Image (cartoon, rainbow, N blue to C red):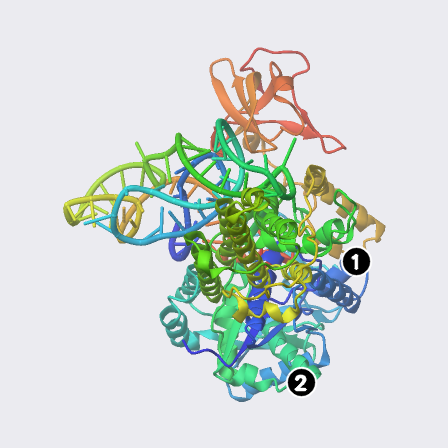
Amino acid sequence: MNQPKRYLITSALPYANGLKHVGHLAGAYIPADIYVRYLRAQKRDVVFVCGSDEHGTAIPIQAKKEGTTPQAIIDKYHEAMKQDFEDLDISFDIYHRTSSPLHHETASEFFTKLNDAGELETKETEQYFDEEASTFLADRYIKGTCPNCGSDRAFGDQCETCGRTLSPDELINPVSTLSGKVPVKKKTTHWYLPLGKHEQFLRDWILEQHKDDWRATVTGQCKAWIDGGLQSRAVTRDLDWGVKVPVQGADGKVLYVWFDAPIGYISATKQWAADNGKDWKPYWEDKDTKLVHFVGKDNIVFHCIIFPVMLKLHGNILPENVPANEFLNLEGDKMSTSRNWKLDMRDYINDFVKKPAGPNGENGGGQMVDALRYYLTAIAPETKDSEFTWKGFQTAYRSELTDIFGNFVNRTFVLMHKLCSGKVPKLHMDILDDNDKLLIADIEGTKAEVQSALEHYRFRDALFQVIDLARKGNQYMQKKEPWIKAKLATSNGPESVEAQKSIDNCLHLCLQLTANLAVLINPFLPSTARKMLYMMKVVEKMLDWENAGKINLLSVGYSLREPQLLFRKIEEEEITAQIEKLKNGLVKETASNKDTIAGGQASGGGVQLNQLTTEPVNKPQIQYDDFAKLELKAGTVTACVKVPKADKLLQLEVDLGTEKRTIVSGIAQHYTPEEMLGKQVIVVTNLAPRKMKGIESQGMILTAEDNNGKLQLLKPENPVSPGSNVS
RNA sequence: CGCGAAGUAGAGCAGCGGUAGCUCGUUGGGCUCAUAACCCAAAGGUCGGGAGUUCGAUCCUCCCCUUCGCAACCA
């Protein structure tokens, strides 16, 4: 492949309704930053753009939740996210925002061009309209009875009780959540992007041209989408928050957020160009530009199907690749904002980067930024979902980064100061041995491997190669044993001279290797690379990629600084504290429900939007026959053990008189196995068996929850014989 | 339901037609320059299950099972 003239790299625009967590960071920001830093080190023409995505229904909703205005929400989160990225050394050339006039202008122009060219369709549909609030209602603002389960708390897009996806038309007795009134159907016209017209183009482009160079997960998902039939997609909607539809008579309509958000990449590029006296056009129009979108897997279809169609119609270049990452789980569970099961970037920054910590109370600073960048890259979900654990973080950081990499650099410097008087020793070609030659070859080879891995978006592999080079350095040093040679060097005679020459060669190469490590690690851990530069007393320019693989980066006789440790230890307590914090912060379904009710009452019921979160629901009345379907029996617990690797589950054996059943129950946080032994419990015995953690549970134990959220077993007031019926 | 991705040593991952590999962890040994670090060695896997194609399958085909995603304010 010919080398592109310039690169435009984008990271998914984060949605400005909350702080972002490390899953986002690992998915779209760190890989992009590594790639960009690598390109910059190669002196390529590259622009790295990102910005806040500030439109869409969720922003006004969030504003209502927080009791403020949409503008206040986006200002708050825009600044917060921008700061977080900065703190984590994500080196955007520009971090823009879609609320800017330039973006509105750009998005309008984009829409107008497509509309004028006849590439959009218009359709008139009937949608629910709230006459009192005189506004069309977003799906989420309509409440009613679910046609599926009968719950009267279903929303226009989904029923929270049964989980079914709905459209507002399906709701029985729809009610506006804005006014509480019954909405009326009203005709409205919207613009649509007919994706179906571009099916052949997408098939050729993705499934043929890119079938080998895009990730399997990416093409796979695209294929699924295309095969599923490409529907026309509404480009506009009735809302007063967003980019106004630039057509006469389209009052009260804005561009759908999915349409305007990716255009944010273009407006960000324009702003960057204006700020830097550059021309933005080639970055979006010249075929010699390589466009790469870094996103998470939920964003694949937007960046591989929808946005490319838009770009094609608008006359822009198409992305060369969309190296989407899968998801990052946290301590065995999916990250979830609503359950507060997540690690926000901000929390990590506060606890590790900004807070003085560590054995000597030193500021965590850059090394803790790099610690996170290291771990998130090492476990990056490139081919499948992966998992962040605090223990894993500690282990990877310590045993790979600190022990292998950090320690190699440290012992090299210490030995150099001890045995070579603090100066870069000579390389004596006359005694160059096989170990020396092998190391030189490894240095050259690693450059090629890292480069190839990075070009193919295999970041975790690339990082591994760098660490592995440090590992080879340790092996090399062990074979050369300069500390043994040093004992010979103090004696008089010819062996002393030979010994010193061997020491010189060893440390010369170890130092050159250290310089190489700085160049190679720079895209991944920029702060560490700079610290190494300081120790070596060399300038930033040494980090140019072309210097990788060379063994003349440090001049003979040059005196170097005293070593400083590259990475501090992470103490056990820091890790356990984080795990505790995570578990304590977990929002239980019930707890959040209580908050919601309290909030609703406090606001006097005028604004009902805070009811968007789930509430306890009174189930519909049932007949005796429905109740009679249940078979309930009293039983005695005869055995009980904790289910391994599940913090909530106990495995019990319950004696039901005629039989013994294995039951898995989620009460481990409330009862210990010992406590359970011998207790009587009420069991639903005709519940369909279900596997949990690989164990089949043949029933369910009944409990009630007290005010503190603790589960209390239901049991007979006085013991009854096992197997007694409950009615 | 369907579609997509995935199931490989205790953990995390590579490999993808021809004696199963890496990192961490474990065990034993070595070294002592170094951040209780480094180096060497060993143990540990019928490559989710079943059938088929093949001289030969972890790798290809088919069926099944499990997990995740395609659909939630979430990369």
Q: Nearer the viewer, mark 1 or mark 2?
A: 1
Q: CA distance from mark 1 to mark 2?
A: 33 Å
* Residue A162 visible in the displayed image: no
Q: Tell whether A515 sits left or right of A434.
A: right
In the rendering, at what x and y percent does residue A560 appear?
67, 59
Amino acid at circle 1: Glu
Which residue corresponds to the image point at 73% horizontal and 60% vertical from the top-left? Answer: A62
In the rendering, at what x and y percent does residue A598 appear?
80, 46
**Residue A713, above or below B52:** above
Which residue corresponds to the image point at 57% horizontal and 42% vertical from the top-left? Answer: A487
**Residue A387, above or below A632:** below
Q: Tell whether A328 sits left or right of A91.
A: left
The front one of A35 and A601 is A35
Amino acid at circle 2: Gly
In the rendering, at what x and y percent does residue A73 appear?
77, 64
Quadrant where the image shows the N terminus of chain A: bottom left
**Residue that mark 2 sits on:** A249
Judge the density around disc 1: few (<14), some (14-19), many (≥20) Cα neighbours within 10 Å: few
**Residue A587, above or below A76:** above
The residue marked by circle 2 belongs to what chain? A
Quadrant where the image shows the C terminus of chain A: top right
